[in-house]
Image (cartoon, grey):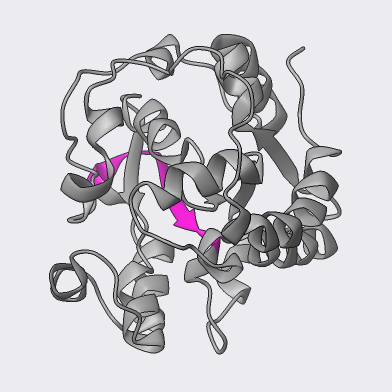
């Protein structure tokens, strides 16, 4: 099984990668299109030079890795993808042979978390409209698309992971609920900038508090993201 998990940034995506990577039957890869995205857009991101040096910059080369032999002789392959890394001209047909999952989070939480690491995020930066487009593509090809909300995972990690595994025909493994603290072999080169909190974790964080207040300057970003979030949230998987 090859799982492509699509989310925006600051969406519990690294913790979910750690959950699957902690299984003995899974290999995992971290944001494999990041360098291709930076090369195509010319955007300045933290550790840009290191990212460009660490990954293929041609999306066709990335696709070849994602669809080629399974890494480390594992039967399953978890791919953590950022929806905003999908840029014009990138191929999408390779996705049709993946188990595509969509991880969502309330935009107010995403904006607050992202802005703490990189100032003044735009709607393009946080990936909601791109996620909605990808969701529509997968639903058109496969007839349905699976959505999980990070809020629900933090409310009930075991219940949600059991429901997710059942939905995609995968046996649940309790190893998904905890992992060793510190960096992981699957981490991207950018991990030292972005992953401090999850490196300090040994499992999913507890329940989230009230929604954060979004600064006035970023209200437009919130307003642009909310319709996409609400549409996918209405389809989110719930624990059995």
Which residue range is magenta in the image? 72-83
| 43 versus 161 height, above or below | below
Name the residue at 33% across, 50% down. Answer: 117
Q: Position of residue 96 (x, y in %)?
A: 65, 64
| 144 versus 212 height, above or below | below
Nearer to the camera, 143 or 215 = 215
Q: Position of residue 142 (x, y in %)?
A: 79, 56
Name the residue at 40% across, 80% down. Answer: 59
| 213 versus 122 height, above or below | above
Q: Quadrant of residue 234?
A: top right
Q: Is residue 80 magenta?
A: yes
Nearer to the camera, 185 or 34 = 34
Q: Quadrant of residue 147?
A: top right
| 106 versus 166 height, above or below | below
Name the residue at 77% across, 34% down. Answer: 236
Q: Position of residue 78 (x, y in %)?
A: 43, 44
Q: Is residue 63 left or right of residue 182?
A: right
Nearer to the camera, 31 or 65 = 31
Q: Quadrant of residue 240?
A: top right
Residue projecting furthest to the front: 216
Q: Tag count in the figure?
A: 0
Name the residue at 47% across, 56% down. Answer: 81
Is residue 73 among what the camera can see? Answer: yes
């Amino acid at each position: 099984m090859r799982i492509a998990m699509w989310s925006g940034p600051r969406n519990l995506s690294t913790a979910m990668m750690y959950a699957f990577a902690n299984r003995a039957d899974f290999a995992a890869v971290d944001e494999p299109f990041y360098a291709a995205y930076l090369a195509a857009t010319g955007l300045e991101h933290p550790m840009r030079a290191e990212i460009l040096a660490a990954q293929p910059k041609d999306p066709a080369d990335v696709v070849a890795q994602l669809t080629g032999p399974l890494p480390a002789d594992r039967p399953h392959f978890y791919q953590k993808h950022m929806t905003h890394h999908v840029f014009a001209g990138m191929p999408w047909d390779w996705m049709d042979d993946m188990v595509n999952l969509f991880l969502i989070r309330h935009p107010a939480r995403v904006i607050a978390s992202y802005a703490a690491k990189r100032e003044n995020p735009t709607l393009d930066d946080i990936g909601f409209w791109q996620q909605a487009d990808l969701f529509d593509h997968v639903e058109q090809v496969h007839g349905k698309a699976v959505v999980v909300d990070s809020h629900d995972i933090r409310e009930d990690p075991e219940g949600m992971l059991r429901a997710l595994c059942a939905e995609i025909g995968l046996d649940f493994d309790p190893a998904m609920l905890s992992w060793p603290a510190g960096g992981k072999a699957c981490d991207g080169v950018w991990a030292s900038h972005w992953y401090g909190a999850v490196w300090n974790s040994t499992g999913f964080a507890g329940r989230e508090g009230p929604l954060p207040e979004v600064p006035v300057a970023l209200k437009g970003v919130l307003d642009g993201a909310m319709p996409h979030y609400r549409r996918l949230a209405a389809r989110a998987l719930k624990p059995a």
